[in-house]
Image (spheres, helix red, strand yellow):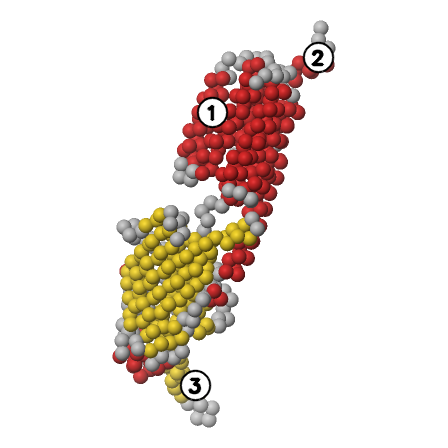
Amino acid sequence: METPENQTQSIFQTTTAKMILVGVLTLALLIPLEFVKNLISERSQRQEEVTSEINDKWGQSVYFCGPILKIPYTYFEESVSINEKTKESVKEKIAHTSYAYFFPDTLQSTAHVTTKVLNRNNYESAVFSNAMKFNGTYIEPDFSSREIADENIQWDKATILIQTTNLKSIKNEVKIRFGNSDFTFEPVYSSNSKDSTESLETGYIDLKKQLASGAHFNFDITYNGSKQIKMVPIGKTTQVQMQSNWASPSFTGNFLPDDKTKKITANGFTANWKILHINRAFTQQVFDTLPNLSQYAFGVDFVIPVDQYQQNERASKYGFLVIGLTFLIFFLIQSISKINIHIFQYSMIGLALIMFYTLLISITEHSSFTMAYIIAAIAVVMMIALYSITILKNRKFPAFIGASLSVLYSFIYIIIQLENYALMVGSIGLFMILGAVMYFSRTIDWSK
């Protein structure tokens, strides 16, 4: 007759009890796995801080909107006041000054962007030097829509305005050739802290005189920058050509380059845009207040597509899958071979699997992600395979475990590298794994 102690022992030796214990252990191992994820997030955040410091010193994102003709004009408001002596109402006109903004009729730009990667310790950031050339034409400004008389237009106090960012990283004196004269841009102080853009503006231009000698303009501007270049298509016809040695551009904004002329190779890219005024929802002239046109901007992002911490984060998301499948392999071997594997031994195997991710991130910071992944995977697979020899008392099952883990890590690496087909490949792989588990577990007697 079995004693209560023997009954308790036999209950814990059942397949169901072992399955429950392994399941509980798998869930418990999610705690150290979460710590590893937090470590990756912390290192990634540190990289962002260092990258921000590098970019701030080299140059931030570039936004460009211009050149814009800014013309002051006088308008009158009628005011009624009461004469205190006669008690009669007196009408008078008060003069006010406002501004009209006119955009170019044609605007052509070429941008030559030279990129490089700056490193600080284990961190890196993509930066660029951007040499931009502009040329175009204006037509004579028309104030007829506001019925403003010519004598009220201050033609001799016109200026040319550029809205941009990253003024501190401009590397040349910016001069515009307008008609037959040269005008120098100066920075304009803005008291509006909410406005992220900065302004460059010329001194006064005698616009009538300049338009008489020709409405053509051209100027150059060179920036040091990072992350992004964006422009606003303010020309009635805007044409932009951009060349760069950056091999993985991300075209962004409201307009994409022409597919017929766009070329992307391992040595860089060439892109061309042609945008007409009918393609965007603003006119060629604006009165009183210049609106924020950044929503109509287009350009290119210069960022490292998938950095090492993103890849480590994606790998760690499959940690639960790796632990679960590895425990499942050991559990099936245990059930088929009748070899007893203690829960402590499962714990050691689980901790070894988690050590893979700490090895991966630490080696990645001093090497490539691929090399780190290979080294970490080989180390963990060999450790578990050698440990399995002492548990399973033979070499056949450990060899199978080593081969299975190698396939599993290879499968996860492939998923991490894929972008468009990651879900499909992952689903097919899991379906095949489920089929294999169903096949090998078909002969197990689950009633014991």
- Residue at the spot 38% in from the left edge and 79% down from the top edge: 204
- Residue at the spot 66% in from the left edge and 14% down from the top edge: 10
Q: Which residue is mark 1?
A: 433
Q: Is residue 244 above or below residue 421?
A: below
- Residue at the spot 31% in from the left edge and 51% down from the top edge: 262
The image's mark for residue 224 is none
The image position of residue 222, as x and y in percent, is 41, 65
Nearer to us of marks 3 and 2 is 2
Q: Is residue 192 above or below residue 418?
A: below
> Going from the N terminus, do you reach mark 3 or mark 2 first?
2
Q: Amino acid at mark 1?
A: Ile
Nearer to us of marks 3 and 1 is 1
User: Dot 1: within a 10 Å radius of its alpha carbon, few (fewer than 14), some, or many (20 or more) residues?
Assistant: some
Residue 252 appearing in the image: no
As helix, strand or loop, the secondary structure at mark 3 comes to: strand
Q: Amino acid at mark 3?
A: Ser
